[in-house]
Amino acid sequence: MDVKSLKVVMRGGGDLGSGVAYRLHRCGIKVLILEVAQPLVVRRTVSFAQAVIDGRTELEGVEAVKVSSLGEVQEAWKTGRIPMMVDPQMKVLAEFQADALIDATLAKRDTGLRKDMAPITIALGPGFEAGVHADVVIETNRGHDLGRLIFEGFAEADTGTPALVKGHGSDRVLRAPGDGDVEHVLDIGNLVKKGDIICKVNKISVEATFDGIIRGLIMQGRKVPKGLKIGDVDPRPIPEHCYTISDKARALGGSVLEAILYLKNIKGSG
């Protein structure tokens, strides 16, 4: 099997999807990421989706660029970059012969993915049934089974609660206190003390509930609905964690790589 000949379309360029794309790209696989026109990215500094807004972005030495045609996709690959295209309906699949299709939106619901949409189909997290929506579903819940390949059934249901980090769980997540535009007071990478104002939504302050560092914060000026996750605070004040791929994203990247190579071999198309 010539890995460099493999072409993968991935839906979703958030922090976890970006970790997956990064690993596939480093292994020589050609990756095309599809996103929405206005991605609600919280961990902007480690998400290739930010290229939709800025035209380009870089993560650990790998650059992603916004493209609008298949010719530009090919040019990005030739120059060692990851192309990012606005195409939430995945219309490009009709003219782009992908070897694999990955849903990395982490939407936790049926997003319209079906097993027959590509020779190999992979879905990350809950909301998908292996054998129906995709050839394989990958477990995304932290714990013993993180990264496990599931060939029948579902991943673990969404708990709705982030994993505990130094005793902090739900309070790590910043949510919009109402509908409105996000106004930054601080930004990703800033250290905070309990009670510090991180941002405002429609002039309503969003405060840190403990000492730590801002690891994620939705972009300035973004219009958001009440209750939407707009940021997160990490109780470990380590700046590098704000700008590098997480352990979870790296684990999922390895699992997706395994799934592609395994399925490519057992389907006899290697």
Image (cartoon, helix red, strand yellow):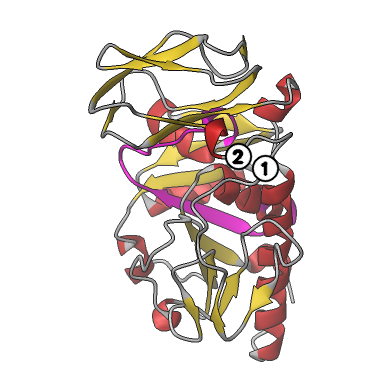
* Residue count near mark 1 (Cα–Cα under 10 Å), binned few <14, some 14–19, many ≥20: few
User: Do the CB atoms of the residues marked 2 and 1 lie less than 8 Å apart?
Assistant: yes
Residue 73 is inside the magenta segment: no
Q: Which residue is rendered at x = 34% and y = 61% of the image?
A: 90
Q: Secondary structure at mark 2?
A: loop
Q: Amino acid at mark 2?
A: Gly
Residue 28 visible (yes or no): no
Q: Which residue is rendered at x = 72% and y = 20% of the image?
A: 239
Say which residue label 1 marks. 164
Q: Nearer the viewer, residue 204 or 217?
A: 204
Say which residue label 2 marks. 169
Residue 33 is inside the magenta segment: yes
Q: Nearer the viewer, residue 187 or 17?
A: 187
User: Is the residue 165 above or below the residue 185 in the image?
Assistant: below
Classify residue 268 as left or right of residue 154: right
Classify residue 9 as left or right of residue 228: right
User: Is the residue 131 above or below the residue 85 in the image?
Assistant: below
Residue 25 image position (x, y, % from top left): 67, 52
Q: Quadrant of the N terminus?
A: bottom right
Q: Secondary structure at mark 1?
A: loop
Region in magenta: 25-46
Q: Which residue is rendered at x = 27% and y = 11% of the image?
A: 203
Classify residue 221 as left or right of residue 185: left
Residue 124 visible (yes or no): yes
Residue 149 image position (x, y, % from top left): 67, 74
Residue 184 image position (x, y, % from top left): 41, 12
Residues at marks 2 and 1, CA–CA distance in whole angstroms: 5 Å
